[in-house]
Image: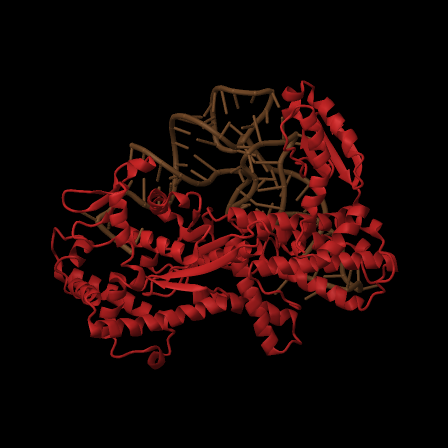
Amino acid sequence: MATDLYAEIVSSIAAPLDGWLVESGAEPGLSLGPPTREGAGDLAAACHRYAKALRKPPQAIAAGLAEIARAHPLVAEVEAVAGFLNLRLDWARVAEKTIPWALGDDGALGRSSALAGQKVVIEYSSPNTNKPQHLGHCRNNILGHTMATLIEAAGAEVVRVNLINDRGIHICKSMVAWRRFGAGATPESTGMKGDHLVGAFYVRFDQAFNAEYEEVHAGATDRPSKDAWFNGDSPLGQEARAMLRAWEAGDEEVHALWRMMNGWCEAGFQATYARMGVRFDHIDRESVTWKLGRELVDEGLANGTFRRLDDGAVVFDLEKLGLEGQKVVLRGDGTTLYTTQDLGTAMQRLDRFGFDQLIYVVGNEQDRHFQVLFGILTHLRPALAGRLFHLSYGMVELPDGRMKSREGNVVDADDLMDELHAGALEVCRENLPDADPGSLEATAEAIGLGGLKFFLLRYAPATTFVFDKERSIRPEGETGVYCQYAYARAGRVLERLGDLDRGITPDWAALTEEKPRAVLTALLQFPGEVRMAAVEHKPSLVTKATFEAARTFAALYNDADYRLLDAEPARQLALALLVEAVRRVLGAGLALLGIQPVEAM
RNA sequence: GCGCCCGUAGCUCAGCUGGAUAGAGCGUCGGACUUCGAAUCCGCAGGCCGCAGGUUCGAAUCCUGCCGGGCGCGCCA
């Protein structure tokens, strides 16, 4: 069972109201929801919009609706104020329905059928195999992986895809540097993680290239740009480019080197993904996909999507998308481009998976690329319209400004996880002096990673935000640690309570006051937020909803009026059930976010 | 120059398919541990929602124009 109790309650109240409106000549679709104004009850609707159709003042409409709503068994009070219909629920009855639902129904955990029957392919991470991952990749990995989880919870079948960029000039740079300066170094011989070792050679190439550039152009007044130098007379540049040509020609020796170094790098990535809890169902590699798309060019030429220029290049006219200029999809010399490959890869996915949605998790600097790509794809296959999504996300900045790889101002993903772990461990030692070292390590890992994930997910994807390492593992505020702490405390109270007599009737009236009501509301609203997060690609709604459950619980827990241990039995049972319920939902929220719950911290 | 994104409390951000008195967290200040775990909680203060017009019974939200910031505009990836 996966029902959304809140949605059911609201629509059961709204349905007869809607019926009355339609009978009176208005359009259906009454929006009944939480009021924006404090003290206006639990549900509200603005009636002004119906005034014209019904030829009645809003206040009269609100009053009419109020009379109908009054009859609903869960409605305790109705009120018509200034054209607004305000309802107060009968919270004892709502609690009586909510608790068993929250304790037993999968819908309370955020499972739904909002995307049932759909197949969704989601591509994320897409790293280059020439250097280790950094904080920016973390946002991508976590965003993509969490979206996959959420979409799955909404009932869709999900295929998680990683398209690894394992070929190209940037890989050749690392290879050249290893061949020149590596002296046979391997991850084993150096004790370095493979991706870090490859990255070190990528940096080494850049250093050598810069030294070469300075040496050759010392004292010169008109130096070429570094790009021009690289693509011109630079010995290092020539060596790297020659290696790329040799790779493309299938040169045995180059391929052996390439396979070896890519193997190191991918093994390193795998370790990083495993620690982050990120996984994939399918791996694509550019070394395989880069030749895709060529057949599409012929097809597009035949049906008029593309046009051939005098020099043989094939282009797509961007006027068709309301943009200026043209996009080349095949060079004059017949070679393909990144876009060509992307077209081919998308088609391959369509053939292979038959998706209803294809989502690309890629930074917002590629907004235009995807606008063009999707435009071309829909011209080639009109059926794809509305099925392609670019989950565009903003940059992650640091407290001291933007991450700049050139200036070495990057936060390495592995180092970051280590630091967060260490920071969490310090506090764990203080708070759990009796715990054994092994469980302290595990707890610190859960808190460090949880803090990171929550922090990366709590911003809407489009938002560029500042990552603050210290703040991410602080227990106060809207953090993962706060939610984990609430979960742990809820568990501890229930433990202390021991076995309760569940045969008695809970005192539901104990849950009608403000604090328990706030918890119930958080539980009731949780599924809707999770569903919306899946449909609108906004995991931040889940961090908010989870935090809300934690926050309302903490407020209740700290209030002496709601102490469980010495409450009388019927009241105690009602409160205990509420705590069990919020703990279950809290656990579900953390699970959806890929965060480990913690029993003691 | 053109296109996209952003501009909301001291700071970091929600709210943007139009609804009543614009929210949260952090920070500041003031409180609560012999009381279920204080990595917690409670309270106060804090806003011409970038500016100016327009549409509407009603605008942070929709439209237009400015100002300020980011990104993009390769036969690169």
- Above or below, A422 against A185 in this view is above
Q: Nearer the viewer, residue A151 or A356?
A: A356
Picture coordinates of residue A88, whole percent (x, y): 77, 38
Q: How is the image coloured?
A: by chain
- Is residue A249 or residue A494 the one in the foreground? A249
Question: What is chain B's hue in the picture?
Answer: brown
Front residue of A555/A519: it is A519
Number of numbered discs overlaid on the protein picture: 0
The foreground one among A434 and A317 is A317
At horizontal 44% and vertical 71% (from top left) the residue drawn is A271
Horizontal side of residue A518 vs A110, given as left or right: right
Q: Residue A105: horizontal and vertical position, in percent? A: 69, 56
- Chain for colour red: A
- Name the quarter where the C terminus of chain A is drawn: bottom right
Q: Residue at x 30, y 74 (%)?
A: A260
Query: In this rendering, does residue A327 appear at all?
Result: no
**Does any portion of residue A547 appear in the rendered image?**
yes
